Image (cartoon, rainbow, N blue to C red):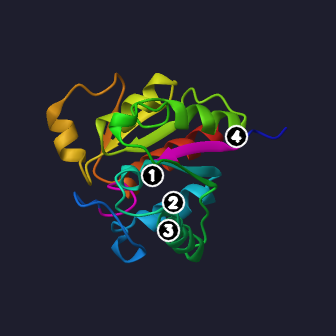
Amino acid sequence: MTHPPKLIILDRDGVINKDSDQFIKSPDEFVPLPGAIDAIARLNQVGYRVVVATNQSGIGRGLFDMATLAAINDKMVEMVFRQGGRIDAVFFCPHTADDKCRCRKPATGMFEDIAARFRVDLKGVPTIGDALRDLQAGAAVGCEPVLVLTGKGRKTEKAGGLPAGTRVFADLPDAVHALTTESAGRTST
């Protein structure tokens, strides 16, 4: 009997790469956090499909265009590929908060689109972010919220108000180690 593939949803800026208050506006500004690229490859090795869901209001603000966002995401995907891993899809919201769209986290549109694309129920699917809105969007559709303390994570933890059941880890490699260790324990029984 085959089991459906496991899915995990990652925020990008502050989780996979260094964040910037001035936005990541070019491929050169995309600098992975220590161990993050290896952590994504590790997720693939234990059967996870990795999806990135990221707010990119820099597009709506006119700071960069869609071609530039594609080049930044291509760099991320290529780095993961070179480590033996894969990102199955990148979902993004190009809107600003003023647009009141359905996709900008904490709204759940990107998560609903992920569920539809992969034909999965998101209940219990880990979603890893560094901002409260990442966790709120995931929790609203039944995901398991995971906060990393990189990027805005320390500020987010200090502010409180995290969704019930939020797990907190130092960074993406730490979170992935815990998830893959638990996953291995469940499959060996």
In the rendered structure, find residue 40 and report the number of the disc placed on it.
2
Residue 147, given in percent of the width and then of the height, sits at 33, 41
Image quarter (top left, top right, bottom left or bottom right) of the N terminus: top right
In the rendered structure, find residue 117 and report the number of the disc placed on it.
4
State the residue position of label 3: 76
Q: Badge 4 local density, few (<14 within 10 Å), some, or many (20+)?
A: few
Residue in view at x 31 percent, y 45 percent:
130
Q: Report helix, strand or loop for mark 2.
A: helix
Identify the image quadrant of residue 12.
Answer: bottom left
Which one is earlier in the sequence, the residue at label 3 or at label 4?
Answer: 3
Amino acid type at image mark 2 = Ile
Which one is earlier in the sequence, the residue at label 3 or at label 2?
Answer: 2
Q: Badge 1 local density, few (<14 within 10 Å), some, or many (20+)?
A: some
State the residue position of label 1: 176
Which one is earlier in the sequence, the residue at label 4 or at label 2?
Answer: 2
Amino acid type at image mark 1 = Val
Residue stretch rendered in magenta on the structure: 5-18
Front one among 133 and 129: 133
Q: Badge 2 local density, few (<14 within 10 Å), some, or many (20+)?
A: many
In this rendering, the label closer to the viewer, 2 or 1: 2
> Residue 180, relative to residue 86: is it above or below?
above
Q: Report helix, strand or loop for mark 3.
A: helix
Mark 2 touches mark 1? (CB < 8 Å)? yes
Which one is earlier in the sequence, the residue at label 1 or at label 4?
Answer: 4
